[in-house]
Image (spheres, rainbow, N blue to C red):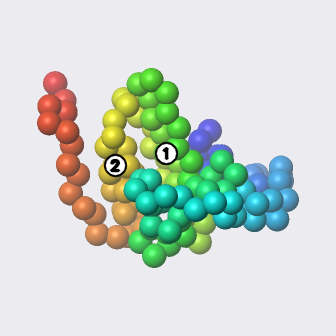
């Protein structure tokens, strides 16, 4: 379902031949409503906030995304509209390493060299 939602947004509100939003809606959804301060995850390098979507650049590509969390759960949905690509990460652990994991998967999706993952101490699978 999340992948279908990503496809719908990459197609500016159209999925399976049905449109639920006008193409022009995305100018408002992904448009610059205010600048995101430095140090905010993937969107810290000149990123901005749209309506429920953050936008910025990654690896030279424009990205838009939305993250969510609750106790014991975190998620990231990152779209790369110009490449028609998306990365969805859902974790049932509240970890500060979600951004690092998202970056690794995004690197792979964009064909960029992958950085080394640095999991927290004691994070080994038992």
Q: Is residue 120 above or below residue 62?
A: above
Question: What residue appears at the point 49 percent right and 58 percent down from the top-left corner?
Answer: 37
86 relative position to 115: left or right: right
The numbered mark at residue 101 is 2
Task: Looking at this view, name the residue that lies furthest to the bottom.
Answer: 60
Measuring 45% from the left and 43% from the top, which residue is drawn there? 89
In the picture, residue 26 is in which quadrant?
bottom right
> Which image quarter holds the C terminus?
top left
**Image position, residue 91 (x, y; %):** 41, 34
- Crowdedness of circle 2 by 10 Å Cα count: few (<14), some, many (20+)? some
Is 8 situated above or below 122? below
Dot placed on the residue nearer the N-terminal end, 1 or 2 = 1
Q: Secondary structure under badge 1?
A: strand
Along the line of sight, the residue nearer the viewer: 37 or 101: 37
- Residue found 70% across the figure and 52% down from its top: 51
Name the residue that disc number 1 marks. 76
């Amino acid at each position: 379902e999340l992948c279908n939602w990503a496809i719908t947004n990459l197609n500016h509100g159209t999925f399976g031949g049905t449109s639920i939003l006008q193409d022009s809606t995305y100018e408002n959804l992904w448009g610059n409503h205010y600048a995101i301060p430095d140090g905010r995850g993937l969107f810290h390098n000149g990123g901005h906030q749209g309506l429920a979507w953050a936008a910025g650049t990654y690896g030279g590509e424009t990205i838009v995304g939305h993250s969510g969390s609750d106790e014991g759960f975190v998620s990231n949905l990152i779209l790369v509209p110009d490449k028609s690509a998306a990365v969805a990460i859902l974790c049932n652990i509240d970890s500060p390493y979600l951004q690092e994991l998202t970056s690794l998967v995004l690197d792979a999706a964009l064909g960029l060299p992958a950085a080394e993952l640095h999991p927290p101490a004691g994070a080994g699978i038992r």
